[in-house]
Amino acid sequence: MRSQANRLLKIKIKPLLLGIVLLNCMFADFFARVNVGNFGVNAIDSALSVVLLSVTCFLFFPQVITKLPISIIYFTIWMFISLIFGLLNSRTLLTQINYQFSIGLQQFLVWCLFVDAFCVGLLIGNDKWVYERFELVVQYVGLFWMLLIFLPGSAFNTRSLAALLALFFSVFYATFRKKRALKWLILALFTFAAIVITSSRTALAACIVALILIEFSDFRFWDFLSWRKVIPFLIIVSILIVLIFLYPPMFDRLSDIINSIQSLVIENAVLEEGNFVTVTQGRSRVWPLLIDKALERPILGHGVGVASAYSFYFSNNSRFTHPHNEYLRFFFDTGLLGLSLLLIGFLSIGRKLFQSTRKGKYTSKQSSLLGLGALVVAATLFVTDNVGLYSFFMAPLGFILGLAITDSSDKEENNADILKSDQNG
């Protein structure tokens, strides 16, 4: 009786849960531009979303807890402890270091939003209705942001928004890879073109890495059918390269990196520090300082939010208020303990999704490809971006991973049940 009541409740709240996740995906960049008193609307939206989703996940706790990686749970607990530790530690910081508890709280809320969205994906992701609505909404949201970026002089032509578009690119291409419908490839190409206009080098790299992984995740070297995908893949990559060449500002930014690599590797020359700092936009100067400071407390870290305070202190640049490297931020704030738990959680998710793509002889599950693409996009963006602070990125990322995991798990469980019943029969 209780199981039937839970099933009915889940049916009724599906639109609400999906709506909350996708609301953050659709409007969070708008919300980030508006403040109410000392708090941004984005922070208020994240807090309300976390409360609503947490209550829902608590109602269905037994159904999601068994599929949620245990290291993700431990990391969330440790991040909360580290948030308090950061507040206490801030009293010993130099007066020049502008620690703000609100920034640490925002980081924790966005992570909780990711975990809640992940749980929502675990809870309702295997529902065909949810899957179809998700595909539909991602199309419209992607087109919406692309059109805003394509508008001349648009205020939304930002590299932070390129992170969300890179996530959409992986969704579009993974769907094309399974359905072979031309509209999904066109959406992927237009998304890539929009990212080119933002001039985000890391987002472009994330798209290309996701493209390779999605295309070749089930590749079998000795299987002739696997080799048939190489030529279409090369054609698509050629189109992407042409798009980069057609936009001079993006090509110039890539040329800076290529010339630097050429000087270091081929010509065996030493770059002038000023030139290298310009190419890396200050990262090459701030990161070593942050690493040295992080090594003072390598195991437990300095506390959530402290890395952002030191980033501004070392850079003295209003545009460098975060480390621009999520791995470094988690190491600085939560120590090796927190970073290890985070990486173990993501690697366990990736391992499960990769195994799912390799189980079929010639085909991979679409949901597994969606999850793999999204995960590698996040892993790439973590290297030089602050996407862990963006609710409009972390919310859809969590939902996609939860959807992919539950779809794979439920199909495996259903197949096991069918096999067991056949044996008993």
Image: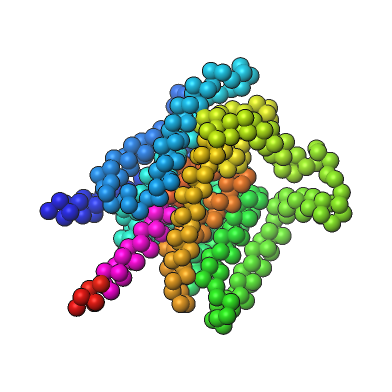
Residue sitting at 31 percent across and 65 percent down? Answer: 413
207 above or below 312? below
Looking at the picture, how far across and down is residue 54, in whole percent? 32, 40
Q: Answer with left or right where residue 36 lies relative to residue 195.
A: left
Looking at the picture, how far across and down is residue 378, in whole percent? 53, 51
In the rendered image, residue 406 lying in the magenta stretch gets the answer yes
Query: How many numbered marks does the figure carry?
Result: 0
The residue sitting at the bottom extreme is 224
Q: Answer with left or right where residue 257 lies relative to residue 216.
A: right
Residue sitting at 30 percent across and 45 percent down? Answer: 57
Q: Main secondary structure of the magenta part?
A: helix
Magenta range is 399-419
Looking at the picture, how far across and down is residue 139, in whole percent? 45, 58
Residue sitting at 36 percent across and 58 percent down? Answer: 406
Task: Look at the image and tell me whether residue 339 can be seen.
Answer: yes
Task: Look at the image and tell me whether residue 370 can be seen.
Answer: no
Looking at the picture, how far across and down is residue 324, in whole percent? 61, 40
In the rendered image, residue 213 lying in the magenta stretch gets the answer no
333 above or below 70? above
Looking at the picture, tell me which residue is in the foreground, 357 or 199.
357
Looking at the picture, tell me which residue is in the foreground, 146 or 270.
270
Residue sitting at 33 percent across and 60 percent down? Answer: 126
